[in-house]
Each structure stands twice: as structure tokens, then as C-alpha cells.
Image: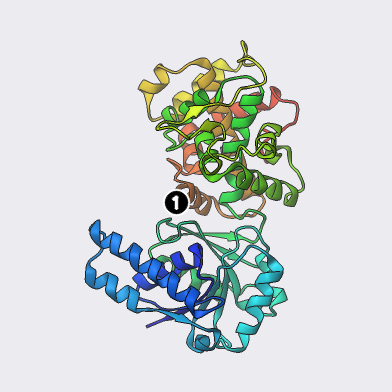
Amino acid sequence: MSTVGILGAGAMGAGIAQTAACAGWRVHLVDLDLDTCEASKQGIITRLARNVEKGRMSQTQADAAAERIAPSTTRDLHGCELFIEAIVEDLNIKVAAVTPVLDVLPEDAIIATNTSSLSVSEFGERIEAAPRTCGMHFFNPAAIMKLVEVVSGNRTEQRIVDRVADVATQWGKKVARCADTPGFIVNRVARPYYLEAFRCLEDGIAGPPTIDSAMKLIGGFRMGPFELTDFIGHDVNAATTRSVWKQWECPARLAPVAAQEAMVAEGNLGRKSGCGVYDWSGPQPVCVYRPTQDAATSVGGLDATALRFCEAATQNAEALADSTEQQRIVFTRILAALLNEAAWAAHQGVADPADIDVAMRAGVNYPRGLFAWADDIGGDLVSETLARLNESVDDNRFAAPS
């Protein structure tokens, strides 16, 4: 039986522990003290019991998984093949916590960091174990979300990346391999879903309900961009945008939007504060965001291009037939921006198109991979649409990579 050590018994560490244990791995769960680890294990047992009640696993399987999880100290990690840190998102704290563990781990143990935003390469260099260090970015809740981004640092050995990808697959995850770049795949490529929605709002094209409905009805997305940002938290979403934008040297495509920054400053963070774009205090969300200008009477003469783009992109012809010009423009702007960002990510060596498609489908539940979607639309129409959109803006953000 293979053994993994997990540093961090919070929500993420516990989710990873549950995932590994259910896949047959022995787990050493480590935190500041054993009481914290024991409480975390009890939480896992409770979640396993719910899975039994829902018929997702048998009681025997749940009991076996729980038995494989051991609240531990760092002294217990001497037999681990894999060690995953899943603690606070601060590089100095991660380095300080992991460095002493290296004295206990086997010399050939793989070191994985669950960071979502920090440099895997820098982490590996600072703990002086770069060749055997990689990123293993789970998505929360880790026991449910299917994606793991396997991140190769600048000096990570290929065999390490291959083994971690195999482990994640064995644990029932979809693997997307990527380079150590800001935002990795999902947190970079998904940015236009939120940003372009806010820009449509700022431009007065449509209000939030219209924008959300356009993406759900025409595009088949499970949640509209404003529903989703309210769910994520506008503070978290805006902070990720600022981080990715700055680390990629401030391209206009990824620039923060004033409307969202103002919401954060006012404390309108979404569901967790009770109010964001929508008021969540009642049985149904009610849009409370008021645009600074009325809906645009003209959308830049893009209606014909947008209609062709939507006809090629949608799988819901009935919804498209009932859509408004504003909805079609919204959908075209947001999806075209996503397709363009995926192209830029591949162009800049973040990941291969196939890995980007896996990441966007498994990580944020997109109805189709973005490269597969672009193929369905047709390269010529995507290029024409981006060119027309770029002519309609003054920041060049729809410019495609050469």
C-alpha cells in the first residue's frame, strides 16, 4: 500500500486525504497538533457516512477509507512516497513548514505543493529540492472536484511529473499538465468569463440578469458570470484577477474592472456578505446592481457577426431564436474572449490545447473545451469575430496571438 503525507488538516488537506484514502492509499495527516488532525478525520468520517447514505459507496468501503487515515506528526512521515503541503497561501510560511519535514521524508519522496498562485519553481528552490518538487493543484472541495493541475517547475524532473499525474489519475482525478506560470491554466484562462461580463455591464450593453441568461441559454454554462462571482466572492475573484494581471505584465485582456473593484470596496462580496450583484437574503436572488448608464441602443454594428458566431457556437437553437441582440453580443464577447485567452495561454507555453480543454471542463465545468469549441465554430469565423470585436474597443484586448 502506498503512503502519502499531507501537511494541513483544513478543508483542502482533509479533502485530499479523503480522496487518497478512498483510492486505497495510507494517509498521514499532519497539522499543528494531533487534536486538529483528529477533528479533521472526524469530519472526513462524517462526509464518508453521507456518501454511504447517498449510495455512493458501501459502509465497508467507508470504514476502510477511514481506517487508512492516521492523525500524525512529522516523525511519522519516514515511509511516504508522496508528500503534499496544503497550508496557507504564503510562500514564506510554506517554506518554513516544509523544510524541516525533508529531514524525515525518504530522499526520493516526491514533494508536491497545492498552491494555486505561488511559484512552484521558487518553492522547490527555497526548500532545496527542486528536481523532485511539483505542483499538485486540487480544486475545492477536493474530494468532489475532478481536476488536478500538475505543475512542472523549472527544474522538476519529468519522472516526477509523470508519477504525480499517474497518482492523480489513480485517485480518480482528471489531470491537466501545465508549466509554472501565473494562474496556471484555470485561474488564468477563466478570467474573461468574469471580466468581459463586467465590461459588458460597464458599456451599458445589458444588465446582470440578461448577461447571466445569455451565457446559460445560448452557451450552456451552468452559472452565469455574475451568479458565479457572487458564489466565489468578489474579493477573492478580484484579488485573483489583480494577481494574474500583474504577473503577466498587465495585458489589457486581463485587466481588473472598476465596477468589481468598487463592489469589493463597498463590502458587497456576494453570497457570503448577503449581497453582491444579487441580494441573496430571500428565497430567490434579486438583482440589486444598478448600471451607471442605460442599456446601449447600438452595439457597434456587430449584430450580423454575432449572430453567425452564435449560430455556430450554440447547441440550443431554440434559445438562440428567442434571444435578443444584446444577449447575442454579450455571448459573443465573452466566449470570444475565452477562446482568445485559451489561444494566448497555449501560445505562451502554459499548456497544450488538450490539457487546457481538460482543465476548463473538469475545473470550472465549461460545457465544452475551448479549443474543441473553437473548432466547432470554425477558425475563420473565430478570427473574423475577434478582429471585428477588436475594432470595437480601444484597448486591443481582442487581438489574437500570431
Question: Residue 300 or 295: which is nearer the viewer?
Answer: 295
Q: Can you give x and y, in whole percent of width and height, for residue 296 in the image? A: 62, 14
Question: Residue 8 or 173: which is nearer the viewer?
Answer: 8
The answer to whether 177 is drawn above or below residue 377 in the figure is below
At a point 65% along the width and 48% down the height, the residue shown is 240
Three-letter code for the amino acid on which mark 1 is drawn = Ala
At a point 50% along the width and 23% down the height, the residue shown is 210
The answer to whether 316 is drawn above or below residue 63 in the figure is above
Q: Can you give x and y, in whole percent of width and height, for residue 266 in the image? A: 67, 36
Residue 170 in view of the camera: no
For label 1, count other residues whose C-alpha is less than 10 Å away and answer few (under 14), some (14-19) or many (20+).
many
Locate the C terminus and report the quarter of the image it occupies.
Answer: top right
Question: Residue 36 or 6: which is nearer the viewer?
Answer: 36
Q: Can you give x and y, in whole percent of width and height, for residue 275 in the image? A: 55, 35
Q: Can you give x and y, in whole percent of width and height, for residue 6 in the image? A: 51, 74
Task: Give the tally of numbered discs.
Answer: 1
Locate the N terminus and report the quarter of the image it occupies.
Answer: bottom left
Residue placed under numbered mark 1 in the picture: 362
In the picture, measured across the screen, residue 143 lies left or right of residue 55, that is right
* Secondary structure of residue under mark 1: helix
Q: How is the image coloured?
A: rainbow
Residue 321 in view of the camera: yes
Question: Residue 213 or 74: which is nearer the viewer?
Answer: 74
At a point 60% along the width and 35% down the height, the residue shown is 337
In the picture, measured across the screen, residue 61 lies left or right of residue 325, that is left
The answer to whether 170 is drawn above or below residue 359 in the figure is below
